[in-house]
Amino acid sequence: MRNVLSFLFPLLLVACQQKSTEEPVVAQVDDRYLTKAELMAAIPNDLPSEDSLEMAGNIIQNWINRELMYEKAQFNLHGVEEDINQRVEKYRKELFIFAYEKEQVAQKLDTNISEKEILEFYDENQEMFQLNDYILKVRYVKLKTNSPDQEKVEQWIQSEDQEELDKLTEYCHKYAVKYYNDTNWVFFNELLIELPIEVYNKESFLRSDNVVTFEDPEHVYYLSIRDLQSKNTLSPLNLERKRIKSLILNKRKLELLSLIRTRLYKDALAQGKVTRYDKARIPE
């Protein structure tokens, strides 16, 4: 890519009639320049030479078009310039504040969360953890239609014998396209996405036989529902643990940022940098 661009740059430099700038440029509109460094930074190093050349040409033309449109807009929109400048300044301040807050959070936020805190949050906010869908513990195996020993899979998937369950796990590691064991809860709607069927009555489906099999042209599916919890009940702690940690961290983050703002305000008041007036007045 860089060899192609090194051939392209001298031609562009002659064409743009470079004025006063210390960097090599590849395009110019009045007294504004697109530098070689800016162009090269926008092009991935691993592009083939032909693609690099085409991309460089597109970037240059887009820059020229944008500068010409900006020039025309400035000439024709004098009435909105102050409003635009105010919005740009506001956005600039927000970017600085965001970067500073991000740095402060990275430096000062305590990310250690104890099991006691998780339990307390779960107990004190149970209204947040009401299920709006059935959750299941299932054994689920998705296989290619030509996978071997499928009759054993149907036997193992409903077994209570640990040795047979170990055989099922070993088999799935070798042949399964997808596999769920029954150690974790899964939302029913997420499971349905995996199955090649339409379920119009969830309650009826959940009362079906211990092992349900499905087929499509390329796969066979084995499903055994081992445990079930109804919607509108309290979601199990293990299912909500990750979410609870995220909620606790977010709460700590908001408290930290509020503390930083409060300290800044109090320090500014003490230094006489801030004054609040009961009535608006013209500054002296």
Image (spheres, grey):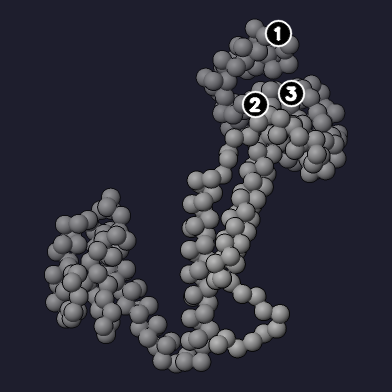
| Alpha carbon separation for disc pair 1 and 3 | 15 Å
Mark 2, residue position: 180
Tell me which residue sits at (53%, 45%) in the image: 108
Instruction: Identify the mark nearer the N-term, 1 or 3.
Output: 1
Front-lying residue, 54 or 187:
187
- Residue 89: mark: none
The C terminus appears in which quarter of the rendering?
bottom right
Instruction: Identify the mark nearer the N-term, 3 or 2.
Output: 2
Tell me which residue sits at (26%, 76%) in the image: 33
Mark 3, residue position: 224
Which image quadrant for residue 204? top right
The N terminus appears in which quarter of the rendering?
bottom left
Disc 1 residue type (three-letter): Asp
Q: Is residue 243 visible?
A: no
Q: Are marks 2 and 1 in contact (CB under 8 Å)?
A: no
| Position in image of residue 124 (x %, y %) | 80, 39
Q: Residues within 10 Å of mark 2 (few under 14, many from 20)?
A: some
Mark 1, residue position: 161
SS class, disc 1: loop
Q: Residues within 10 Å of mark 3 (few under 14, many from 20)?
A: many
| Position in image of residue 113 (x %, y %) | 63, 34
Tell me which residue sits at (77%, 22%) in the image: 226
Whether 122 is drawn above or below 145: the answer is below
